[in-house]
Amino acid sequence: MIKICKTCGKERNMMSWETECYPCEKERHAREIRRQIENGEITSVDCEDKIYCPYCGQVHEEDCEDDTFYVGGEHEFICCECEKEFLVDTHVSYSYSTRRE
């Protein structure tokens, strides 16, 4: 269903109960994580699709183009914002689809 997002004001395809589009919801979620880190409410971030520095809340996306982060396990990382070192634990998941030929 096409609705107007309450945050950005753009027409987007949303479910009937949604009031915010997916990009705006993701940004709000990221701001909330950063706020919790900055206020000391959390010291780790689990199971996100982006790497958040657990010290300053900086989101690292472009810094992770290295193939290292596509291999499961723990990897050392240095934040480009606060220059503190932390561990990134990569979780890899596979799914399969089949079809008749």
Image: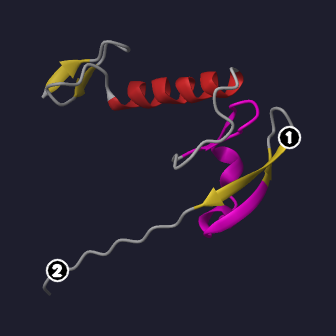
Write the start and end of the magenta stretch as one range.
50-76
Q: Earlier in the sequence, mark 2 or mark 1?
A: 1
Answer with the quarter of the image where residue 18 lies: top left
Relative height, residue 72 to residue 26 (above, below): below
Whole-percent x, y for residue 23 in the image: 40, 30
Answer with the quarter of the image where residue 2 lies: top left
- Badge 1: how crowded within 10 Å, few (<14), some, or many (20+)? few
Q: Is residue 36 left or right of residue 92?
A: right
Q: Secondary structure at mark 2?
A: loop
Relative height, residue 28 to residue 93 (above, below): above
Query: Which residue type carries mark 1?
Result: Lys
Q: Quickly name the residue at label 1.
A: 84
Residue visible at 64% across and 32% down in the picture: 42
Q: Is residue 7 left or right of residue 54?
A: left
Answer with the quarter of the image where residue 60 lies: top right
Whole-percent x, y for residue 11 in the image: 24, 20
Whole-percent x, y for residue 61 in the image: 63, 44
Tell me the quadrant of the picture where the C terminus can be found.
Answer: bottom left
Relative height, residue 16 to residue 92 (above, below): above
